Image (spheres, grey):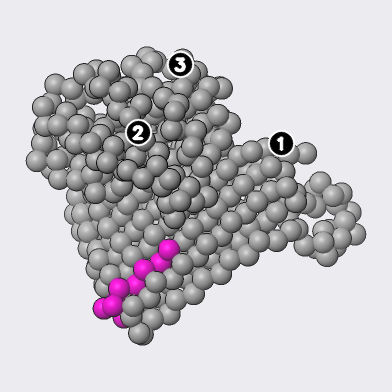
Amino acid sequence: MSEKNHFSGDHIASHFEAVKANLPGADIDWLQSSRDEGMTNFLETGIPGPRVEEWKYTNLGLLKSDVFKNTEASGDIAADVVAAALLGGLNGPKVVFVDGYLSETHTNIVEQEGVELLSLTEFAKSNADQTQKLLLHAQNSGSLSNLNLAMMTGGYVLRVSEDVKLAEPIQIVHIASTSVASKSLRTLNYIDVEEGGRAQIIESFISTGGGSNWRQNNTYVTLARSAALEVYQYQTENSETIHMAETLVEVAEDADFKHFSLNIGGKMSRTEIKPTLIGENGNVELRGAFLGRDGVSHDVFTHMKHMVPECESDQIYRGVLDKGGKSAFQGRVYVAKDAQLTNAEQSNKNLILDRSAEANSKPELLIYADDVKCAHGATVGELDQDALFYLNSRGLDNKAAKALLVEAFVSEVFDEIDIEAVKDKYLTLAHSWLEQGE
């Protein structure tokens, strides 16, 4: 291990040895072996340092000595906290995790023929071979993914059968309680949508108060031919939380994947989305916004792989940075030699509200095919003073005019959302963030 490129994870390994006998599934020998292998793989590389290109804008130095500890299930949480975290007007399944553990009290699985929704541990007990194959995704996805595999306390498995469409979106809520400080919250999820299947997932991450946490939420998705999945994520965790969410997706022929994200909270957040188009006429759309101030750092990393001809991908990300905020967008598009007639678009725009803020943008196009249409754009700028003056001349004060311009800038990301409750939530959170800065 090169110390200049990676930080040692030995202190985490010591904690793992102390707690692994109490982790969920400890009575399943092959699962424990997978955890051990995950920790071994993690230790071979360690925690990415600033000289690792993909992590150059994300400072993980505070993790090289601090130990965020796995805790036992903290028990129940107040029903009003859960109710406040859920979006109203939706009657689909509801899955609630508290401090990384599934809360059976608040989880409500609405049964539908052709849809299987289980906790990862329950799925592993009766589907050993399939689960072991799924865990290979984590083992092949980098050191932190292996750490998540070794230390995870929960997760879910969603399987949608051929030509089945979910009647309602699934709401998945991750709550960090204030029961213990310096917690590690690690969940591992798998989604498999068979040919012609359709599903929507709304996933939120919240904190009930203060306390430092390190959250990892890793999700692996497989979309078969003509399948479709929409994922809506948003996080408003407390200012001491390190938030990491990684999504890996395989998109088959004629399949469609859409991912929307909004990052507001956390001391540092990192959203990674890595789709691979493996079937012709596949389509991927990524939309996201991040809002930061007062030392908050947001990092978005996307790696779009076009492996076959005639696929499309489109990425739109918007950042708003106020005093002391920092962000980074790294968007990589890879087009393989045989992936002719690829159409790939990427756009990242950042709005700076205070000169002390910092926005980094690094788009990358790696194109090895000849007949393609690929484009990217990245901008960093301040509010349009002419537009601000125009709104002032129409009777709006500076605060109202500024809010209107920022909301219009962010709302572009979410215009295509069909679920009104989700669109309203995103815009409400953005508006609340703006008001807090005044």
The image quarter containing residue 7 is: top left
Count neighbours of disc 3 (C-alpha within 10 A) and say few if under 14, some if 14 to 19, many if 20 or more. Answer: some
- Which residue is located at x 86 percent, y 60 percent? 389
* Eye-nearest disc, 2 or 1: 2
Q: Is label 1 in a helix, a strand or a loop?
A: helix
Labels in figure, total: 3
Question: Are circles 2 and 3 on residues that touch, CB within 8 Å?
Answer: no
Q: CA distance from mark 1 to mark 3?
A: 27 Å
Q: Is residue 233 left or right of residue 190?
A: right
What residue did someone put label 1 on?
A: 436
Disc 1 marks a residue whose amino acid type is Gln
Disc 2 marks a residue whose amino acid type is Gly
Disc 3 marks a residue whose amino acid type is Val
Q: Is residue 36 left or right of residue 398?
A: left
Is residue 338 found inside the magenta-colored segment of the image?
A: yes
Q: Is residue 239 visible?
A: yes
Q: Is label 3 in a helix, a strand or a loop?
A: loop
Q: Nearer the viewer, residue 190 or 367?
A: 367
Q: Is label 2 in a helix, a strand or a loop?
A: loop
Q: Which residues are magenta?
A: 332-340
Q: Which mark is residue 180?
A: 3
- Give how far across and how far down residue 403 sits, in percent: 74, 49
- Which residue is located at x 61 percent, y 61 percent? 349
What residue did someone put label 2 on?
A: 9
Q: Is residue 378 above or below residue 183?
A: below
Which comes sooner in the sequence, label 2 or label 3? 2
Q: Is residue 27 left or right of residue 286?
A: left
- Which residue is located at x 28 percent, y 78 percent? 337
